[in-house]
Image (spheres, coloured by chain):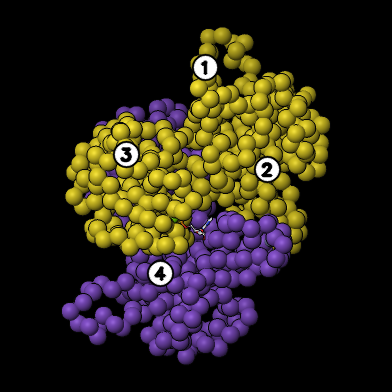
Chain colours: A purple, B yellow
Amino acid sequence: DISPQENYFSRETLDRLSGKRTDKAWLEAKQREPDTVYLIFSNLSPMVSTSQEDDGAAVESKLCRFRYEAVKDLLQKPATVLIFLGVEKRKNPSPSSPEEGIREAPAWFAFSTNEDAADLVKRCREKNCSFPKMPNRDLLKLNEEEAGIVAQARSVLAWHGRYSFCPTCGSSTKLEDGGHKRSCLNSECRSLKGVHNTCYPRVDPVVIMLVIHPDGNQCLLGRKKVFPAGMFSCLAGFVEPGETIEDAVRREVEEESGVKVGPVQYVSCQPWPMPSNLMFGCLAVAISTDIKVDENEIEEAQWFTRQQVIDSLFRGASPAFNIPPRQTIAHQLIRHWIGINANL
Amino acid sequence: DISPQENYFSRETLDRLSGKRTDKAWLEAKQREPDTVYLIFSNLSPMVSTSQEDDGAAVESKLCRFRYEAVKDLLQKPATVLIFLGVEKRKNPSPSSPEEGIREAPAWFAFSTNEDAADLVKRCREKNCSFPKMPNRDLLKLNEEEAGIVAQARSVLAWHGRYSFCPTCGSSTKLEDGGHKRSCLNSECRSLKGVHNTCYPRVDPVVIMLVIHPDGNQCLLGRKKVFPAGMFSCLAGFVEPGETIEDAVRREVEEESGVKVGPVQYVSCQPWPMPSNLMFGCLAVAISTDIKVDENEIEEAQWFTRQQVIDSLFRGASPAFNIPPRQTIAHQLIRHWIGINANL
Ligand SMILES: Nc1ncnc2c1ncn2[C@@H]1O[C@H](COP(=O)(O)O)[C@@H](O)[C@H]1O
Ligand SMILES: Nc1ncnc2c1ncn2[C@@H]1O[C@H](COP(=O)(O)O)[C@@H](O)[C@H]1O
Ligand SMILES: [Mg+2]
Ligand SMILES: [Mg+2]
Ligand SMILES: [Mg+2]
Ligand SMILES: [Mg+2]
Ligand SMILES: [Mg+2]
Ligand SMILES: [Mg+2]
Ligand SMILES: [Zn+2]
Ligand SMILES: [Zn+2]
């Protein structure tokens, strides 16, 4: 067996303190504290400062962090959407030192604004600041801690962007609970009687699975038309209402590849804030092997041998395919399979 | 180890044939076929016929099934929402008998209507027909196969009921894809550019966990005010955006009981169509034991010994608490823990 992997986008460095979301006075006081951190989002991208490695190839991004004084004018604008992310988890709580203990941990907020991006960037003292254009690629350049924070912030801000009207009656809604709730402004609306999911951010469960050949030594990978040339990855699909993740795995694999699946085993999950998916990574054992791809979704699907996968993972001379980057749960699932023995 | 449990609401007896949802001609032909089955929903309850056991206590429900001819007038009404559920999975596919092979499996549809419930009930030839009033209790009386079908149907119909306006622009929407999609009627709407979750049914992931005491011989159960007297169950809570199920378990347990959790292990999941939750059942190992309940959510939480749990499960003389019914994943999780050895 292999120790539990940690997936990109899944590290929790903040304590969400959900109980404080309804405490308006506490939130307002926190907003003004000097060590409170603000992240600025434009078009669902966070402002980052980018550093080029010496070889010009690898690039790292760091979130641009702002203090209250530097953004308070933006917080007043009517189009700004502000959310409370939480307070920093104390890494070394030192109850022995009372002063440390009393000082509360710094709070984090994120907000989206539609002010001019070039003007926003000028507010930052870091070098090479920008709002990256391709989240699927550019948000993978953060460090693990910041990626976890962006996962929460981007999902919730994306929800505000798409869910500003009440789906039950079509009225406008207002933001509540530190940005974790929206309530209908029509006092007659059914959504205000009882508790309804229309008021809360949406999380879309998705299954992503490595299908293992009945012989235990090959796995099924597919490619979508939009993938970079040569790249193959795990099959994936949205979980439907009234379905378990195990049945969703069986259904999606058969739909997309024609392969029938028997046992399914959950491995780990990964938040994927594009905009708000939760990917459930599974191993799935095939009970048939003929491939018939659904051409609407998949361009090609193929069984690859364990050796071909090892060559791709560890960059053999001329690998049979390119594996997705390590930040994806697909990569981690494939690596997990290589790490366990051949007979499931 | 224990063989994978099957949870109530999770049996898939229909093949959803999602590829056929966009094939209008096929769907319309299927609607009219003589062996097609229709389920009628009123107020998000399916019409069922109820049988009383001899002792008057236990009660079983069966879905009332209708043919096209018996409901075609209702299908014409503008308020009716019709969804395609799938076709029956062949239990014994007999490729040897070609006639069997050619005949397609019966299709199932469900629809909701706001016609008078008493009038609707008169359409059925079964005895004791009704639309049950308390889904949380009454939908647990179906057999496993029908429960799985209701899980899909009720979730999707509930989504149509609450999401009839476009959350992005507030316009009306129209039903598409055999009832599995809603699209905005405002041709300028952003939700029509690219693929957006606003158009698809919502599934809300929830974690539900049995927290095991560090000594391995006690588990943490809580009760909400609304529970029947004496009942204790597993803690549970909605997964938030940007969060793994494992972190959601740790966060919700600490929020609701003050207990800190270390390792978390997924066991199985259960669709819970009230209205559209997907419950992820986990075992969680506590790393602290003091209980401090969040009184907004939980009335009481308590460590129970393995023996107390066994007495409740198998109806000992005077059990320390009442366990939730076998149809709940909470019950199955507790039973699973009793079935494995004390040291996780
Ligand atoms: N929550 C959702 N968000 C986006 N697309 C969805 C969603 N649910 C279903 N879909 C549909 O699923 C397709 C992708 O297929 P798959 O990921 O294999 O299930 C999309 O193109 C949509 O048509
Ligand atoms: N999708 C959702 N549907 C309903 N309630 C939600 C949802 N997300 C968050 N909540 C809130 O979560 C509360 C229940 O707490 P819990 O189940 O412990 O997370 C509800 O009373 C709501 O305030
Ligand atoms: Mg698919
Ligand atoms: Mg799909
Ligand atoms: Mg897919
Ligand atoms: Mg809770
Ligand atoms: Mg909660
Ligand atoms: Mg709860
Ligand atoms: Zn409303
Ligand atoms: Zn719209």
Which residue is at the front of the view, A70 or B117? B117
Q: Report helix, strand or loop for mark 4.
A: loop
Kind of residue sitting beneath label 3: Pro
Residue A111's disc is none
What is the chain letter for disc 2?
A: B
Label 2: which secondary element: loop
Q: Are marks 3 and 2 on the same chain?
A: yes
Q: CA distance from mark 4 to mark 1?
A: 54 Å
Query: Separation of disc 2 and disc 4 at Cα?
Result: 37 Å
Q: Quadrant of the C terminus of chain A?
A: top left
Asked if badge 3 and badge 4 are on a common chain, one would say: no
Task: Kindly identify the amino acid type of the residue bearing the numbered disc 2.
Answer: Asn
Q: On the image, which quarter does residue A190 sit in? A: bottom right
Question: Are marks 2 and 4 in one subunit?
Answer: no
- Percent from the top left, x then y, of residue B343? 19, 44
Residue B43 disc label:
2
Tell me if label 4 and label 1 are in contact, CB under 8 Å: no
Q: Are marks 3 and 4 in contact (CB under 8 Å)?
A: no
Which is more toward the observer, A213 or A305?
Answer: A213
Q: Is residue A289 left or right of residue B137?
A: left
In the drawing, what numbered circle is on residue B93? Answer: 1
Can residue B293 be seen in this snapshot?
yes
Spot occupied by residue A159 in the image (x, y as percentages of width and height):
56, 63
Q: Position of residue A275 (x, y in %)?
A: 52, 60
Q: Indicate whether A273 appears above or below A336.
A: below
**Gap in angstroms between the C-alphas marked 3 and 2:** 37 Å
Marks 3, 2: nearer the viewer: 3
The residue pinned by badge 3 equals: B319
Amino acid type indicated by mark 1: Pro
Whether residues under marks 3 and 1 lie with C-beta atoms below 8 angstroms apart, the answer is: no
